């Protein structure tokens, strides 16, 4: 199990994942790719494993975000929204 010791490490991991989420969304919506979802993700993941972003520290990720026109907060918000879509609706919606 991975032990996360500091807030900086947590932010770094979440920011890396935010870039992965963005990359996947672009890859997933490419109309030229006509594979099923499993094939697309397999192809995406093989490229992602080789991506330099995976080894960047927080400073490098922050700089990349700025270069791409994002703030850290925006990227983390995009990541949060992406994962919230996959979550079931709260119980309060079930009664409606």
Image (cartoon, rainbow, N blue to C red):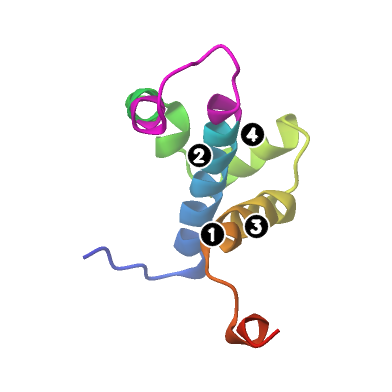
Please, what secondary structure does the residue beneath circle 4 have?
Answer: helix
Instruction: Indicate whether residue 20 is drawn in magenta.
Output: no
Rounded to the nearest whole Å, what is the CA distance between mark 2 and mark 4?
13 Å
- Depth check, mark 3 against mark 4: the one in front is 3
For marks 2 and 3, the one nearer the N-term is 2
Check residue 33 for magenta coloring: yes
Marks 2 and 3 close (CB-CB < 8 Å)? no
Q: Which mark is residue 81?
A: 3
Q: Give the residue furthest to the front.
A: 96
> Mark 3 and mark 1: span between their CA atoms?
16 Å
Q: Horizontal and vertical percent for residue 57?
A: 48, 44
Quadrant including the C terminus:
bottom right
The span from disc 2 to disc 1 (Cα, nearest Å) is 14 Å
**x then y, percent, for residue 63:** 66, 37
Label 3 vs 1, first from the N-terminus: 1
**Residue furthest to the right:** 69
Residue 68: image x %, image y %? 72, 30
Query: Residue 31 falls in which quadrant of the image?
Result: top right
Q: Say the numbered circle drawn on residue 11.
A: 1
Which residue corresponds to mark 4? 64
Q: Is residue 49 visible?
A: no
**Range shown magenta:** 26-41
Label placed on residue 20: 2
Q: Secondary structure at mark 1?
A: helix
What is the spatial separation of the Cα atoms under label 2 and label 3, in whole angstroms? 14 Å
The tag earlier along the polypeptide, 3 or 4, is 4
């Amino acid at each position: 199990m991975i032990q996360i010791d500091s807030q900086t490490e947590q932010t770094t991991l979440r920011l890396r994942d935010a870039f992965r989420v963005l990359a996947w969304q672009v890859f997933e919506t490419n109309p030229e790719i006509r594979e099923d979802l499993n094939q697309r993700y397999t192809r995406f993941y093989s490229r992602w494993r080789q991506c330099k972003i995976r080894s960047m520290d927080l400073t490098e990720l922050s700089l990349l975000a700025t270069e791409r026109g994002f703030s850290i907060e925006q990227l983390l918000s995009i990541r949060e929204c992406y994962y919230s879509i996959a979550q079931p609706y709260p119980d309060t919606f079930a009664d409606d």
